[in-house]
Amino acid sequence: MRIPNIPGFDQQALEKYFKNTGMLFIGRIGSLLIKMIVSIQIANYLEPTNNGIVTGGTVYIYFFSAIATLGLDQFIIKELHQFPEQRDTILGTSFWLKVISGFVCIPLMFLAYQVYPARATPYHYVLILSFIGVAQAFNVIDSYFQSQVQSKYIMQVQVAGNLVSAAIKISFIYLKTPMVYFVYAYLLDVVLLSAGYFFTYQRKQRNIFNWSFNKPLAVKLLSYSWPLIISGIMVALYMKIDQLMLQNIIGVKESGAYATVAQLSEAWNFVPAVVVSSLFPAILNARRDDPERYKKRIQNLYDLMVYLSVPAALVITFASPLVYKLYKPEYAYAAPVLSVHIWSGVFVFLGAASGQYLIAENLNKLTFIRTGFGAIVNIVLNLLLIPKMGMMGAAIATLIAYASAAFFILAIPKVNKQGIMMLKSLFLISLFQKVTKR
């Protein structure tokens, strides 16, 4: 199929990367459908109060996921793209960095729980989940296959792992097991994916035991990624702190109902991650070879983010009451909250795209600054709105925080043109310019 000729559109680039992106989408969509079906069944089984208790423990995982992953994923792809002959060193160094950081997160999560505990969630739930940081170290293999434009392997692992995980969780429901079993199930999700990545990588003359650790490379990677580590913590704060604050300010039942809103609204946040990670090599090539093409590809990426996110948000806004027919009646009052929260995804999409530009330009510190600003906005608004409006206040705070973080770069002269480009995409100015130039 040939796309009509639109100025700035690169047909060859589309054909080169479409298959890889398509494979990532198949894997993620397949996994999403499986997870959504199972998560609805779990929420109905646990009911709002117990659902709030279980999901309260997962919040701490999000807080420390940036430390556990070290923000390395895109840099691994970048390094493998530039130095493919150093594959075993790059992967080995990244793997051991993630293992070490995963173990470091375990006591840090304990300290975080002591400072600001989820009052209804027992600590041993958090302790079980804290080992996720160690288990996810094998995700470096995901980055390797992305750098090779071989995302079919990622798809196979994700779908297979989630099918096994779904079968186990459904059996827990059927057997009416205690809710702690579902806490173990969250950890099992990551263990299954890691095992899948391990066995997939071992095929075709690849051997994980050939990986090696290189200290200078480790220092180099950490020097690039530390701003992303801090910004990742900030992102986790303004993505998940509302659930913890709801539990502590309003009650665990309210946080349990709101958890379903967050799950439904954030379920599609994998889309920008898939798109930008798959197209990142093409963006890097354009930056190296043709500055004008580089600029056009960035603008096209912003346009694509809007074309994907706005229609989806519109559909969910009007369909939210129907979506909550899938849940028990106890959850129905959360439907209007979903209609508001879903719009935060538009700014997640744009923020993910602009984040790739900052990585390509080695402006990672700006990522930390803008996400820190978003986190502050969200925490302040949550403190003001949750006591008055409950979970609707949390949704409004999240929406404003996401928008603030995405467009904070308008205030930074070095990159404010990127903010203008995002605004052109958001208000369809870029689309109008392309159509009128045809």
Image (spheres, grey):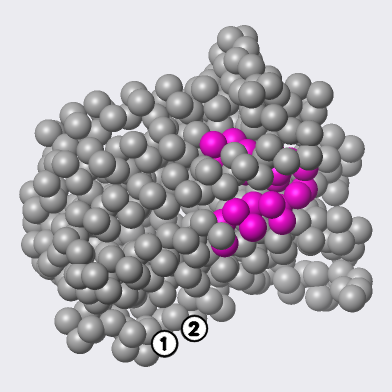
Q: Please indicate, yes or no, whether residue 247 appears anywhere in the rendered image.
A: yes
Residue found at x 32% / y 68%: 171
How many tags in the picture? 2
Q: Which residues are magenta?
A: 138-159
Q: Say if the magenta span includes residue 141.
A: yes
Q: Is residue 382 left or right of residue 24?
A: left
Residue found at x 57% / y 26%: 94
Q: Nearer the viewer, residue 87 or 62?
A: 87
Residue 315 badge:
2
What is the crowding at mark 1: few (fewer than 14 residues within 10 Å), some, or many (at least 20)?
some
| Label 1 secondary element | helix
Q: Please indicate, yes or no, whether residue 377 appears anywhere in the rendered image.
A: no
Whole-percent x, y for residue 132 in the image: 37, 40
Q: Amino acid at mark 1?
A: Ala
Whole-percent x, y for residue 322 in the image: 37, 90
Residue found at x 44% / y 45%: 191
What is the crowding at mark 2: few (fewer than 14 residues within 10 Å), some, or many (at least 20)?
few
- Identify the residue under disc 1: 319
Position of the N terminus, as image quadrant, is: bottom right
